[in-house]
Amino acid sequence: TVYPNQQIASVQVAKRIADLIKARQSSGGKAVLGLATGVTPIRVYAELVRMHKEEGLSFKNVITFNLDEYYPMQPTAAQSYVTFMNENLFDHIDIDKNNVHIPDGTLGTTEEVAAFCLNYEKQITDLGGLDMQILGIGRTGHIGFNEPGSAPNSGTRLVTLDDLTRSDAARDFGGKENVPTKAITMGVGTIFKAREIILMAWNQKKASIIKKAVEGEISGEVPATFLQLSEHVEFILDEGAASEL
Ligand code: GLP
């Protein structure tokens, strides 16, 4: 779906999330959301905060799992995805912080990380899976931090970041040399199990990767192309991001 601009598109995505939350509320259930970081979803979160403050949208029945986190990363660091989510969403809504899950960038050993990743998958499965996963897309074609070479059935795991991804993150870290080389990310397989997947992209600078993701050959070289295999995916774009389709 192509919208005239990212503001209109973001409001539509926020509305979809709010409708899901309300539907679950009215049946006494929980909404299990997969959330993303980056510039792309910021206006969606701003709209959800507005709906909470002005329309009384409650997040008490919402459980969230974030896609990824840099590794190593302290949650209190300015660049952590914990800080990002708190600043853009969680600190402004009535969600129970016990219901918030973000991969842990503080674990010391590869064994601890592996155990954490298995448990992350199990927590999602035990809740019956993700109702909705929202995604941005990196210029490498990554979803979450599933970089080129990721397998379609990959699970939550420690990965090495692509050079281009680290260049794109350099500004946040005051130089590429400060960007961690690794991250913990949900896998392509984890994302795939969500009942509904919404990938958002804005601006001309995402146009060529969106063309590859939507129209290109399905390949681990562009992990977002795996989404072509799912029946439950919608790409929500502004005119810039859709301009090469
Ligand atoms: C980041 C995140 C991704 C995000 C992507 C695009 O590295 N790990 O989840 O979708 O890169 O970021 P942005 O939305 O800032 O363009």
Image (cartoon, rainbow, N blue to C red):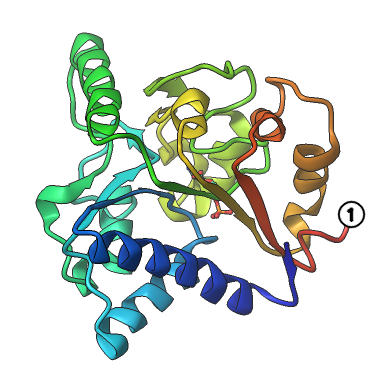
Q: Identify the residue shown where x is 20% and y is 68%.
A: 91
Tell which residue pokes out farthest to the bottom in this image: 54
> x and y percent of residue 24 in the render?
29, 59
Nearest the viewer among 1 and 167 is: 1
> x and y percent of residue 241 in the render?
76, 59
Residue 2: quarter of image = bottom right
Q: Is residue 79 above or below residue 15?
A: above
Q: Identify the residue shown where x is 81% and y is 59%.
A: 242
Q: Secondary structure at mark 1?
A: loop
Find disc 1 in the rendering and name its residue. Answer: 244
165 lies left or right of 183: right
Please state which amino acid type lies under the numbered disc 1. Glu
Nearest the viewer among 75 and 47 is: 47
Residue 65: quarter of image = top left
> x and y percent of residue 167 in the render?
59, 42
231 lies left or right of 245: left
